[in-house]
């Protein structure tokens, strides 16, 4: 097995749920940035590949929502994720970087919010 892949698998298997959430956001951001560059370079195939990867991450985030924990927060996140997913589909169909920018703005904001919440939670435990 490829050492980089093995390292990544170990990171995922040993990560806390909070770290996994942040890793998903990081992946979505990275995939969106790569797709955006591909669109600018007129590489439709690469853009498509990375937009589909970003969509898969968003789909995973949607499926991980726990409606029974805090229904209002889960519904709001589902709505945001749904919007991001739609923007990524539109970006893929129309090869529009503006749609990716819209998605990235939300993904980055959520990432920063979760990161801060997790840091505060860790400080509270310590």
Image (cartoon, rainbow, N blue to C red):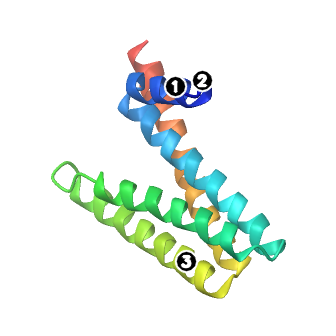
SS category of the residue bearing label 1? helix
Foreground of the two, 24 or 113 = 24
- Residue at the image point whose x is 70% and y is 81% from the top: 96
Q: Is residue 114 visible?
A: no
Q: Which residue is mark 2?
A: 3
Q: Determine the CA span between mark 3 and mark 2.
A: 35 Å
Q: Is 119 positioned to the left or the right of 79 in the image? A: right
- Residue at the image point whose x is 56% and y is 58% from the top: 107
In this rendering, the answer to whether 78 lies above or below 91 is above
Per the rendering, the mark at residue 48 is none
Give coordinates of residue 50: x percent, y percent. Answer: 61, 62
Q: Which residue is mark 1?
A: 6
- Residue at the image point whose x is 58% and y is 28% from the top: 2
Q: Residue furthest bottom?
A: 94
In this rendering, the answer to whether 124 lies above or below 12 is above
Q: Is residue 69 visible?
A: yes
Q: Are marks 2 and 1 in contact (CB under 8 Å)?
A: yes
Q: Determine the CA span between mark 1 and mark 3.
A: 33 Å
Give coordinates of residue 53: x percent, y percent. Answer: 53, 60
Q: Badge 3 local density, few (<14 within 10 Å), some, or many (20+)?
A: many
Q: Which residue is mark 3?
A: 87
Q: Nearer the viewer, mark 3 or mark 2?
A: 2
In this rendering, the answer to whether 11 lies above or below 116 is above
């Amino acid at each position: 097995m490829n050492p980089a892949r093995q390292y990544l698998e170990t990171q995922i298997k040993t990560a806390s749920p909070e770290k996994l959430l942040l890793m998903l956001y990081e992946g979505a951001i990275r995939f969106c940035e790569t797709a955006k560059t591909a669109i600018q370079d007129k590489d439709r195939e690469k853009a498509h590949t990375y937009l589909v990867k970003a969509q898969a991450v968003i789909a995973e985030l949607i499926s991980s929502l726990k409606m029974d924990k805090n229904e209002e927060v889960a519904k709001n996140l589902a709505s945001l994720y749904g919007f991001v997913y739609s923007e990524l589909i539109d970006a893929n169909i129309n090869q529009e970087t503006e749609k990716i920018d819209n998605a990235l703005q939300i993904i980055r904001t959520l990432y920063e919010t979760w990161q801060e919440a997790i840091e505060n939670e860790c400080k509270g435990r310590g």
